[in-house]
Amino acid sequence: MTLKFYEFTGEYYALIKAFSKEEAIAFYKENVCDVDSRVVQVSTPYAWEKFQPHLGELTIVDFLEKKVDILLQDTDL
């Protein structure tokens, strides 16, 4: 199964990797904000472009690891 990337742009921003949109939404509601948010699937190159400036505090392993996780989130959280 392949991980996909989902960008949430509602009340709180998040870039989440998950195996499905439903899984990403559930993870967002549990770990970021329980309010419905606009979510779109984004390409791997787009997700990498957003993620890359944060290398140092995060690693390439965080990006490639085969587990559902938040790659980026709103700094107001």
Image (cartoon, grey):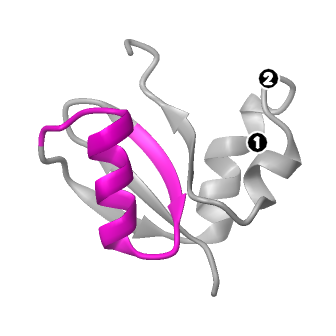
Q: Label 1 amino acid?
A: Gln
Q: Is 62 above or below relative to 4?
A: above
Q: Is 33 above or below relative to 15?
A: above
**52 left or right of 38 in image:** right
Q: Label 2 amino acid?
A: Glu
Where does the image place residue 23, in percent across and percent down from the top left? 38, 66
Query: Residue pushed farthest left?
Result: 36
Where does the image place residue 21, in percent across and percent down from the top left? 35, 71
**Which contiguous range is marked in magenta?**
14-35
**Residue under pointer 2:** 57
Label 1 vs label 2, nearer the camera: 2
Say few, some or many: other residues with alpha carbon within 10 Å of mark 1 (under 14 / 14 to 19 / 20 or more).
few
**Residue under pointer 1:** 52
**Is residue 23 a member of the stretch shown in magenta?**
yes
Quick one: 28 or 38, which is closer to the camera? 28
Where does the image place residue 17, in percent across and percent down from the top left? 55, 59
